[in-house]
Image (cartoon, rainbow, N blue to C red):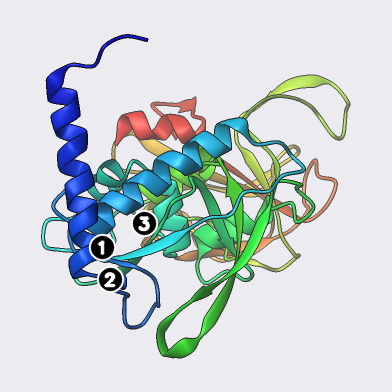
């Protein structure tokens, strides 16, 4: 066994002393009043509760690496009130937990969300935290691909304000996929449907109508016929009409030489050259053109080239 450097002993000794002091002077953990979870005062080694949280995160990561499907993991929860200057990314970096985990547990739908003064729940187990029901478009997208029969799934109740408990399901080790990450990180881009289920992703696929292997230029989002379709960003109506493949469609032009396409619409509710805002209703979900059922075919192009939603992140 290799000898340890004296400085390493000094570090561990100082850390042990901090923990002992916490036990002597704070015999009972400090809890967040509204959440009933151990409260971290500051994200630094000066806070003994944060030291304990860091140890729990490290232990959870080790357990995650060694986990077997028939041995579900259990997430631990701490609380922290965000300070001035805190951002989701800086908090995630200090906690050594992916920002996806903190965002999904706290139901944060955009990277632009202001956090100062907000009581955040900090999980010890990296993963996605999916609620029973969606409160925003991002959660609806997460729920669309949620498999309740996943053997690694951990279900639990999160204590909230006024004693209200919220049901969550943790997928250990999971992260936002490219589509979800785009709508979370890219400013000005919103999800084009209130609720949907992703049925086909960007890239090579077998055409469900012809059976041919072709490149799919966008994503398909299944939703009930008549569901409103929203503009993903502000822009202008460049083209609308009918196409044998796309059926009733709308193409919007946006800043930065970008365009978005909405296909298989049942109805179109805007006019050519209209100036529109993000979230404007363009039409309704249908099954026109080459389609096997009601859904929205959604594309984003950059300089005339179709882009995978995850690839958008390089351009913003």
Q: Which mark is residue 110?
A: 3
What residue sits 18% from the left and 55% below the top? 86
Q: Return the disc, 1 or 3, that comes first in the chain's sequence.
A: 1
Q: Whole-percent x and y of residue 161?
A: 41, 84
Mark toward the viewer: 2 or 3: 2
On the image, numbered disc 1 is attached to which residue? 23
Which class describes the residues within 10 Å of circle 2: few (<14), some (14-19), or many (20+)?
A: few
Q: Where residue 78 appears, x then y in whole percent?
A: 37, 63
**Picture quarter containing residue 9?**
top left
Marks 2 & 1, CB-CB < 8 Å contact:
yes
Which residue bears the numbered disc 2?
27
Spatial separation of the CA atoms under disc 2 and disc 3: 38 Å
* 297 vs 197: above or below: above
Q: Nearer the viewer, residue 179 or 56?
A: 56
Q: Residue at x 78, y 56 (%)?
A: 294
Where residue 204 appears, x then y in whole percent?
69, 22
The quadrant of the picture occupied by the N terminus is top left
At x 52% / y 31%, what residue is drawn? 308
SS class, disc 1:
helix
Q: Nearer the viewer, residue 70 or 213?
A: 70
Which part of the image, by quadrant, shows the C terminus?
top left
């Amino acid at each position: 066994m290799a000898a340890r450097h004296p400085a390493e002993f000094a570090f561990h000794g100082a850390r042990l002393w901090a923990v002992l002091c916490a036990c002597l002077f704070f015999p009972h953990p400090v809890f967040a009043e509204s959440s009933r979870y151990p409260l971290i005062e500051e994200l630094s080694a000066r806070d003994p509760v944060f030291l304990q949280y860091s140890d729990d995160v490290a232990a959870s990561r080790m357990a995650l690496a060694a986990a077997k499907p028939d041995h579900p993991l259990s997430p631990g929860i701490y609380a922290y009130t965000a300070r001035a200057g805190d951002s989701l990314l800086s908090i995630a970096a200090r906690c050594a937990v992916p920002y996806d985990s903190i965002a999904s547990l706290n139901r944060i739908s955009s990277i632009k969300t202001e956090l100062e003064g907000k009581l955040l729940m900090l999980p010890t187990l990296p993963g996605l935290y999916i609620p029973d029901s969606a409160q925003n478009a991002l959660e609806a997208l997460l729920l669309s691909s949620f498999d309740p029969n996943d053997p690694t799934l951990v279900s639990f109740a999160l204590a909230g304000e006024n004693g209200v408990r919220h049901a969550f399901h943790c997928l250990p080790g999971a992260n936002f996929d490219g589509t979800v990450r785009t709508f979370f990180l890219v400013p000005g881009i919103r999800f084009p449907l209130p609720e949907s289920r992703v049925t086909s992703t960007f890239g090579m696929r077998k055409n469900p109508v012809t059976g041919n292997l072709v490149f799919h230029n966008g994503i398909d989002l299944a939703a009930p016929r008549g569901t409103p379709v929203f503009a993903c960003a502000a822009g202008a109506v460049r083209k609308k009409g009918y196409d044998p493949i796309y059926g009733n469609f709308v193409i919007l032009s946006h800043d930065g030489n970008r365009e978005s396409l909405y296909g298989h619409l049942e109805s179109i509710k805007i006019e050519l050259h209209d100036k529109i805002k993000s979230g404007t209703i363009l039409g309704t979900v249908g099954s026109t053109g080459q389609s096997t059922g009601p859904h929205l075919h959604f594309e984003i192009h950059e300089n005339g080239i179709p882009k995978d939603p995850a690839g958008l992140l390089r351009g913003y």
